[in-house]
């Protein structure tokens, strides 16, 4: 009899476990606040975008995008924990709720936006796919690459663009597909491939890791559009808005000349746009479910978009990328954030 | 006297006290619970995915894949479907598993016998091989072969050249590809005839040995038939074979057959690693045959070669086969480590790129698991049939 009873109890518990996923979860914002930190998915190491330094602190433009969201919620840019993910793992990690947002130089495409149950919350870097090649091969243009062996990272849009480009040009290639960008770089260094292909920013970052960066060059051709940005789960519009507007606040701040250094003086500014941005006027924060001064916190702890760019991938960093199309629209780039109003 | 008392059976118990009814009842309940649990999981997953806007279903298999794969046993190009990438991955997995199983068995048997050699050096070398290889994680060995050994090969323009036909460089091994011309059917026919003749010869020789005791040199004669008959057929058909030679074009060699370094590295690592386990299995099998058997064979005057072939190995096989099966299963499953070095196996192609481009993780992972299960069960089945053939037959 006892046995039967314990079986019955066990069964009841099993049912409980199975039924649990039905219970509706709290909103992402509430869940993040309860946890006390933001869980952010990043790369497992890509200079300029997300990489731990020698003390284990994560740095990079993707990392700063996460920190800005944490600053907006907690007023503390350090309230983030990072989950390093490969390209193959990233969407599953976000879908399953293991991370709250994904900021892992991820290209915004229709398929990803519409069929993965995800939403892209903006673009923090406009990129394009290019080719890294050893200088001693004497190749100056991608149209000379027919028959080349090419190293790629698995699970990226790169694999598809590469094929489109070679097919359109009627050229052949041999793809060697690796799990991480680190491994694909190793394949390139060991001579397994003639060419390494990836987003140009990644190539610049990977090139800076070579023993002799001047031995390789990036070909001038850009074969695709790669708008990279933060991603959130579909179905929580409030959270989607928060991530979207944190990035917009950073871009607007650059446009208005508000930086992490002058943000305290700017609190006294008479410019109504700046007043709204920093929470001195209107209550933009409440509309998003945040503190009224969330803009101030973002700029205080992380800074505006330009600062974030210069610090991580700008010309004075090892990655050394010019602003190019990532400049503000007022400077001839494409960065144009909707107004905070 | 009391007839009624003798006839009456003990009162049959109430159904819920009947042990048989009870056991059937609880088994039905248990099965129902299992099915209900499984159904709940599936239904829950599907409805959760739907509510999160994630696509489901197997329709994606017909969509255009649009990415290249470096090596394919079936015709493939990027305009084909995701379903096709499944077959590419599957055949590549089967290829490396089959190559690995053959090589691991051969190496394993050699090392296993060497381990028992009376030659001190041979025995110790085998011991060192086993202890070193089986105690290093397989993934590390794959990386070792791939990055340490193969990348030290020269670049295509400085290839190692063997007689202008075979080339070795860090992009792979290039060998000429035989192309059969019209009339090659005659050669196939000659091969079939030769095999039939050798089979007949064996049966005849065995009968003759049973009847007269004379031993016919079946092996030497059979080998001669296998070589001479197809060779005659080949000449009679007018040498219907040409070779597609590899040659350097632009970045790399074209033409011929290419064995990519990823395949070679994976093959070496899987074979050598599994061989170290097989060697120990072989050793245990041979040691399980009692010394008395060998001594008895010697006493009958059997030479040591025949003793090994007719007395020791058949008995050792009974011990060797079951654990050997699980090593084969391990090898097939370990081949999924291919993804680490970019060999396009099922996990790398289908569960890697295809999964990522479509985002349909649940379907892709389910298909992949079903495939590995099928491969493993097939290996088990074949090995079980073989095991039954060599198992002890009670007479």
Image (cartoon, coloured by chain):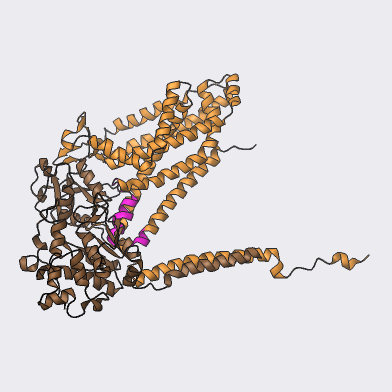
Chain colours: A brown, B orange
Total numbered labels: 0
Say which residue appears at 22% left-offset and 50% top-offset. Answer: A152
**Could you tell me residue A221's position as x and y percent?**
10, 54
Find out whether residue A271 is within the magenta segment.
Answer: no
- Quarter of the image with the N terminus of chain A is bottom right
Q: Nearer the viewer, residue B146 or A284?
A: A284
Query: What predominant SS class does the magenta segment belong to?
Result: helix
Find out whether residue B347 is within the magenta segment.
Answer: yes
**Could you tell me residue A32's position as x and y percent?**
32, 68
- Quarter of the image with the C terminus of chain A is bottom left
The quarter holding residue B31 reads bottom right
**Could you tell me residue B136's position as x and y percent?**
39, 38
Q: Nearer the viewer, residue B58 or B119?
A: B119
Q: Nearer the viewer, residue B161 or A129?
A: A129
* Magenta-highlighted residues: B341-364
Q: Left or right of A14: which side holds B87?
A: left
- Extreme residue toward the right, this view: B1
The answer to whether residue A176 of the structure is visible from this angle is no
The answer to whether residue A246 of the structure is visible from this angle is yes
| Vertical comparison of B9 with A178: above or below | below
The quarter holding residue A97 reads bottom left
């Amino acid at each position: 009899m006892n046995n039967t009873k314990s079986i019955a109890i066990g069964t009841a518990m099993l049912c409980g476990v199975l039924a649990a996923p039905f219970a509706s979860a709290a909103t992402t914002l509430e869940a993040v606040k309860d946890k006390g930190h933001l869980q952010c998915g990043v790369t497992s190491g890509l200079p300029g975008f997300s990489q731990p330094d020698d003390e284990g602190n994560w740095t990079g433009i993707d990392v700063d995008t996460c920190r800005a969201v944490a600053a907006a919620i907690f007023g503390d840019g350090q309230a983030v924990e990072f989950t390093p993910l490969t390209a193959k793992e990233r969407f599953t990690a976000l879908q399953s709720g293991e991370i709250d947002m994904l900021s892992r130089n991820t290209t915004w495409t229709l398929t990803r936006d519409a069929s993965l149950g995800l939403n892209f919350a903006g673009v923090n870097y406009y990129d394009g796919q290019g080719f890294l090649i050893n200088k001693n091969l004497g190749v100056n243009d991608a149209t000379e690459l027919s028959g080349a062996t090419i190293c790629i990272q698995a699970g990226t849009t790169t694999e598809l663009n590469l094929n489109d480009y070679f097919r359109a040009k009627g050229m052949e290639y041999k793809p060697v597909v690796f799990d991480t960008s680190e491994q694909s770089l190793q394949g390139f260094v060991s001579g397994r491939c003639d060419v390494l292909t990836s987003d140009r920013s990644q190539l610049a970052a990977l090139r800076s890791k070579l023993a002799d960066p001047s031995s390789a060059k990036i070909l001038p051709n850009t074969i695709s559009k790669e708008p990279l940005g933060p991603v959130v789960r579909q179905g929580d519009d409030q959270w989607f808005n928060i991530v979207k507007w944190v990035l917009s606040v950073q871009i607007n701040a650059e446009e208005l000349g508000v930086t992490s250094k002058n943000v305290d003086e700017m609190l006294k500014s008479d410019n109504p746009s700046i007043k709204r941005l920093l929470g001195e006027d209107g209550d933009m924060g409440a509309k998003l479910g945040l503190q009224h001064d969330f803009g101030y916190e973002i700029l205080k702890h992380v800074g505006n978009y330009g600062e974030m760019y210069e610090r991580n991938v700008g010309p004075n960093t090892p990655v050394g990328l010019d602003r190019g199309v990532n400049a503000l629209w007022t400077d001839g780039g494409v960065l144009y954030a909707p107004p905070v109003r | 006297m009391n007839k009624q008392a003798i006839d009456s059976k003990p009162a049959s118990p109430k159904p819920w006290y009947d042990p048989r009814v009870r056991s059937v009842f609880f088994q039905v309940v248990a099965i129902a619970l299992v099915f209900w649990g499984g159904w709940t999981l599936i239904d829950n997953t599907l409805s959760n995915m739907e509510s999160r806007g994630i696509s489901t279903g197997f329709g994606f298999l017909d969509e255009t894949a649009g990415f290249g794969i470096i090596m394919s046993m079936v015709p493939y190009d990027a305009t084909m479907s995701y379903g096709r990438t499944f077959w590419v991955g599957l055949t590549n997995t089967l290829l490396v598993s089959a190559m690995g199983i053959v090589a691991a068995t051969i190496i394993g048997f050699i090392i296993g016998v060497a381990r028992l050699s009376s030659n001190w050096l041979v025995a110790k070398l085998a011991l060192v091989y086993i202890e070193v290889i089986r105690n290093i994680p397989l993934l590390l060995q794959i990386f070792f072969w791939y990055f340490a050994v193969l990348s030290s090969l020269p670049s295509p323009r400085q290839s190692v050249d063997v007689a202008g036909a075979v080339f070795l460089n860090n992009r792979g091994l290039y060998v000429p590809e035989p192309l059969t011309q019209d009339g090659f059917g005659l050669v196939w026919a000659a091969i079939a005839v030769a095999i039939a003749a050798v089979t007949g010869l064996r049966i005849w020789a065995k009968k003759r040995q049973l009847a007269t005791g004379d031993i016919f040199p079946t092996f030497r004669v059979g080998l001669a038939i296998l070589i001479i008959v197809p060779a005659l057929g080949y000449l009679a058909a007018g040498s219907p074979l040409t070779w597609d030679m590899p040659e350097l074009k632009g970045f790399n060699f074209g033409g011929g057959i290419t064995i990519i370094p990823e395949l070679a590295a994976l093959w070496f690592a899987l074979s050598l690693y599994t061989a170290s386990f097989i060697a120990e299995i072989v050793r245990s099998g041979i040691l399980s045959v009692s010394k008395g058997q060998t001594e008895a064979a010697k006493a009958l005057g059997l030479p040591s070669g025949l003793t090994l072939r007719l007395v020791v190995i058949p008995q050792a096989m009974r011990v060797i086969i079951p654990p050997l099966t699980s090593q084969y299963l391990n090898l097939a499953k370990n081949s999924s480590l291919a993804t680490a070095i970019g060999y396009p196996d099922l996990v790398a192609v289908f569960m890697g790129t295809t999964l990522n481009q479509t985002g349909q993780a649940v379907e892709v992972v389910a298909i992949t698991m079903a495939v590995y299960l099928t491969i493993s069960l097939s290996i088990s089945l074949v090995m079980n049939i073989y095991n039954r053939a060599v198992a002890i037959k009670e007479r």
